[in-house]
Image (cartoon, helix red, strand yellow):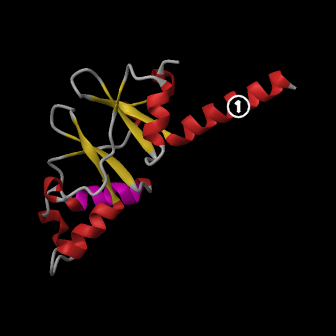
Amino acid sequence: MNIAFFLTPKTEVICEKITSTMRQVLERMEYHRYSAIPIIDEKGVYIGTLTEGDLLWKMKSTPNLKFKDTSKVQLEDIPRHTINKPVHINSDIEDLIATSVNQNFVPVVDDNNIFIGIIKRSDIITYCYERLFHNMKKEA
């Protein structure tokens, strides 16, 4: 099955540019109630995924960093502790399932590593559940 079926396109995904500040991403994540957000560069290339944990670790490891000062911290200066690997748009469902085990969403890129959207783990689970349920009905 083509994984494009599951794709939430980039136009519907909240992401942040690598040139943004820590404060901008904090406010965006708070507003949308997200715990992780894809990071792209100015050309749309997928850089990685930033999590709430990354932001907390940055706060902890930066002495005297107060919230008002987060507008001076560049996103590129925040280490990411988890590497959320993207899948290629031509990947198969098995690659998608394996990648989604430890990620809330799987970033999807094209041949040039340009971010084109995400696939939510909940959509993958729903698909697997429906397939399992359908097969159980056939056997009964």
Write down the quadrant of residue 74 in the picture. bottom left
Left or right of residue 24, residue 87 in this image: right
Residue lying farthest bottom?
64
Q: Where does the magenta region start and end?
A: 23-31
At x 38% / y 19%, what residue is drawn? 90
Left or right of residue 97, residue 62 in this image: left
Q: Secondary structure at mark 1?
A: helix
Residue 20 appears at what percent x and percent y?
18, 51
Identified by mark 1, the residue type is: Leu
125, 140: nearer the viewer: 140
Residue 112 appears at what percent x and percent y?
21, 23
At x 56% / y 42%, what residue is drawn? 122
Left or right of residue 101, residue 51 in this image: left
28, 5: nearer the viewer: 5
Q: How many marks?
A: 1
The residue that label 1 is drawn on is 132
| Magenta residue check for 33 | no
Q: Quadrant of the C terminus?
A: top right
At x 59% / y 39%, what residue is drawn? 125
Residue 139 appears at what percent x and percent y?
83, 24
Magenta: main secondary structure: helix
Categorize mark 1 by other alpha carbons within 10 Å: few (<14), some (14-19), many (20+): few
115, 97: nearer the viewer: 97
Left or right of residue 2, residue 76 in this image: left
At x 42% / y 54%, what residue is drawn? 34
Please indicate, yes or no, whether residue 48 appears anywhere in the rendered image. Answer: yes
34, 32: nearer the viewer: 34
Please indicate, yes or no, whether residue 7 appears anywhere in the rendered image. Answer: no
